[in-house]
Image: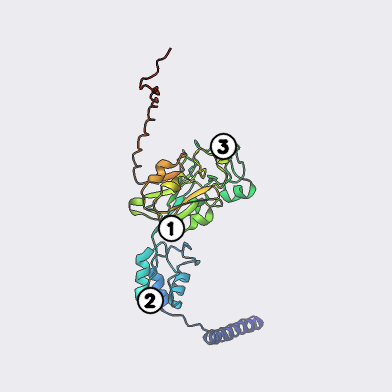
Amino acid sequence: MEVLLYTILTLCVLGVLAAIVLYFVARKFRVEEDPRIDVVEKMLPGANCGGCGFAGCRGMADALVKREDISELFCPVGGAEVMKQCAAYLGKTAPEKEAQTATVRCGGTCAKRPRTNRFDGARSCAVAASLYVGETGCAYGCLGFGDCVSACAFGALSMDPETGLPVVDADKCTACGACVKACPKGIIELRKRWPKHRAVYVSCVSKDKGAVVMKACKAGCIGCGKCVKVCAFDAIKVENNLAYIDPLKCKLCRKCVNECPTGAIRLVGMEPLPREPKAAPAAAVKPAPAKSADGESPKSE
């Protein structure tokens, strides 16, 4: 009994001594944290989505407080209003940045891009992309397994069963970029958010030549360059057989939409321009018969 009692007392004394040592060690090596970090963290939306480039809102708040120049920092979920609020509290200048929304740049629906095989593995775009090009003849198009939908923490993406493509709800999208990182084919892009969610963009990322594209997908870009010729704002470039519309230069004039022979340029939130009727070919004018030296027309025999 005495042995048990001494053992308990010894353990208690050791525990107290260890606690005292840990207390003084903690005091000695304590790191003072700026109290403003807690305040800024509360101003942030708390989504912890990683769209700002940090693991969570705590990391973003720490960077906002410690950096003198915060022009490179931006919270896509909170947007400009939250950044202005944080900057005003810290006495710094808020970064200016256009509001963005996720855009699915693939128009290869089930009807336009028929399947040539069927994948029996795990229903994951990342897994399928690591094994082969996909279930269709297009090596660039959407795989359709919904990794982007799973990555979205705001419920802004869903798979359309009729088209087999993801659909973005612009009202819910915060432009956090999670879906962009999740897509192994790189078909999702953050683009400028226009009023009323209007948009004009090339819904194709294929860099194959036109003939190859048309065999795989009837809605792909063939790099013909007709859209470039009608754009008055130098917003369209064709590189590697693919047209791209710069959202910062585009004025939504919609002329390129009518010129695209495959319908690869998609128009959202607006009606297309009325197509101008093609002019009828002019009737051929028969040349007048030549006159003879005496001024009379020669008679046919």
Of callouts 3 and 2, the N-terminal one: 2
Q: Position of residue 104 (x, y in %)?
A: 47, 49
- Of the image marks 2 and 1, the number of the one nearer the N terminus: 2
Quadrant, the N terminus: bottom right
Assign a secondary structure to mark 1.
loop
Whether 170 is drawn above or below 91: the answer is: above
Q: Nearer the viewer, residue 85 or 34?
A: 85
Q: Residue at position x 36%, y 54% from top?
A: 194
Q: Position of residue 8 (x, y in %)?
A: 61, 81
Residue with the mark numbered 3? 215
Q: Secondary structure at mark 2?
A: loop
What's the CA distance linking mark 2 and mark 1?
24 Å
Left or right of 20, for residue 172: left
| Numbered disc in front, either 3 or 2 | 3
Q: Earlier in the sequence, mark 1 or mark 3?
A: 1
Q: What residue is shown with label 1?
A: 175
